[in-house]
Amino acid sequence: MGDKDTKQRMPRSAGHPSVQNEVTDKYSLRGRVFHKLREDILSGKYKENEELREAAIGDELGVSRTPVREAFRQLELEGLLQIVPNKGAYVTGITVKDVEDIYAIRSLLEGLCARWATENISREQMEEMEENIYLSEFHAGKGHAEQLAELDNRFHDILYEASNSKMLEHVLREFHEYVLRVRKKTLSDDARGVQSNAEHRQIMEAIKLRDADLAEQLANAHIRKAYQNMVKSGLYEAYEENESGDETRAEQEM
């Protein structure tokens, strides 16, 4: 079994404390603003093509315009915001191509994560995974979509943690935020909720058997099936409609 507690922590920098605190606080503030805005964009609070104003966002979050401006730049790098010089910042959202790429990459990374989890999972993590699946089966049978979505999220969190790779865990959590809303909507489909949990159980059993090849294969297939279900559910068309609407608006503005 893997033991995270045996891993050594990186030593703190020996720089001047006041300088360190200032840099840390600044980064933390920018990070909080960035994650809040990204969450609001992905949740649909801010619609595509909606303008975001630095002053208004700063007032809402109780911060100056500087961390907001820095967050805007980071959101632009992620393709969620477009900054037009001398005009403003506009929400771009997620395109159909983005969705395809996210699921394709995530399926490969989840497979790798399951492989490493097979090698490193602790007894406590395995017990939590088993409990998670039992609870998921109960809520799936009752049609409790909200509880099922939370448990589904937690299953993947356990898998990420069990990989014993901070880098892989970080990357997967970043992708996870992009698909969170879609997965929650598809899990409201009772049939998919039951099927998803059955797939989780298969992944867990492969990990218990220490079959890394099978665990990787099942985790990879699990994400691909989630993508296929999204297409069947009609949610994929919603992204296509948003894109066609954007093209129409762009033509009208020309």
Image (spheres, helix red, strand yellow):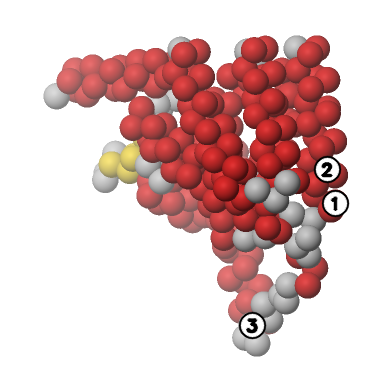
Residue 91 in view here: no
- Rounded to the nearest angstrom, the CA distance separating label 3 from label 2 is 36 Å
| Residue closer to the observer: 93 or 161 | 161
Query: Where is mark 3, residue-wise?
Result: 13
- Could you tell which of marks 3 and 1 lies nearer the N-terminus? 3
Q: Which mark is residue 128?
A: 2
Q: Could you say which disc has been placed on residue 124 in the image? A: 1
Q: Is residue 128 left or right of residue 108?
A: right
Identified by mark 2, the residue type is Glu
- The disc placed on residue 189 is none
Q: Secondary structure at mark 2?
A: helix
> Which of the 4 image quarters holds residue 17?
bottom right
Looking at the picture, does residue 35 appear above or below residue 168?
A: above
What percent of the width, then of the height, locates residue 174? 54, 46
Is residue 77 depicted above or below 238 in this figure?
Answer: below
Camera-side residue of 211 and 137: 211
Dot 3, crowdedness within 10 Å: few (<14), some or many (≥20)?
Answer: few
Between the C-alphas of marks 3 and 1, the distance is 33 Å
